[in-house]
Amino acid sequence: MTVLSPLKVCDPWAACCAKSFSDKPGSQPDLTPVQTRILQVLKETGGLERQELAERLKLSEEELKRDFATLRHMEKVRAEKKDGCIILSLS
């Protein structure tokens, strides 16, 4: 699956689609339990490095990357560089 559908963290078309679906009245995106937990941990901590977030959630880096990319397309999370480290946080 990964070979046929590689992960695209920055995908303007996916972000546009996610935003247009969530803008419809009465529409709310269905989040997986992992995605919900990612949002909770980032809210509690204010942001973490990818490796630390993966360890807290007991996920592989690949699993975290895939769920984070989905949340990023929904514009719920972001990644930013601080002091030479990439921090994952809420948008």
Image: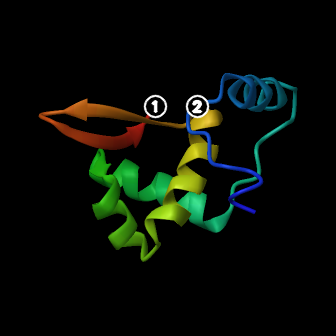
What colour scheme does the image use?
A: rainbow
Q: If you read the primary sequence from the N terminus, does the residue marked by circle 2 or circle 1 appear first?
A: 2
Q: Residues within 10 Å of mark 1 (few under 14, many from 20)?
A: few
The image shows residue 74 at horizontal and vertical percentages of: 65, 35
> Taking 51 as reference, is 7 left or right?
right
Label total for image: 2
Query: Which residue: 87% across, 34% down?
Result: 26
The image shows residue 43 at horizontal and vertical percentages of: 39, 48
Is disc 2 in contact with disc 1, using a CB cutoff of under 8 Å? yes
The image shows residue 87 at horizontal and vertical percentages of: 29, 42
Query: Which residue: 84% across, 37% down?
Result: 27
Q: Secondary structure at mark 1?
A: loop
- At label 1, the amino acid type is Ser
Which of 64/21 is in front?
Answer: 64
Q: Is residue 31 above or below residue 33?
A: above
Which labelled disc corresponds to residue 70? none
Q: Secondary structure at mark 2?
A: loop
Q: Quadrant of the N terminus?
A: bottom right
Query: Which residue: 68% across, 59% down?
Result: 2
Q: Is residue 7 above or below residue 52?
A: above
Residue under label 2, please give it: 75
Residue under label 1, please give it: 91
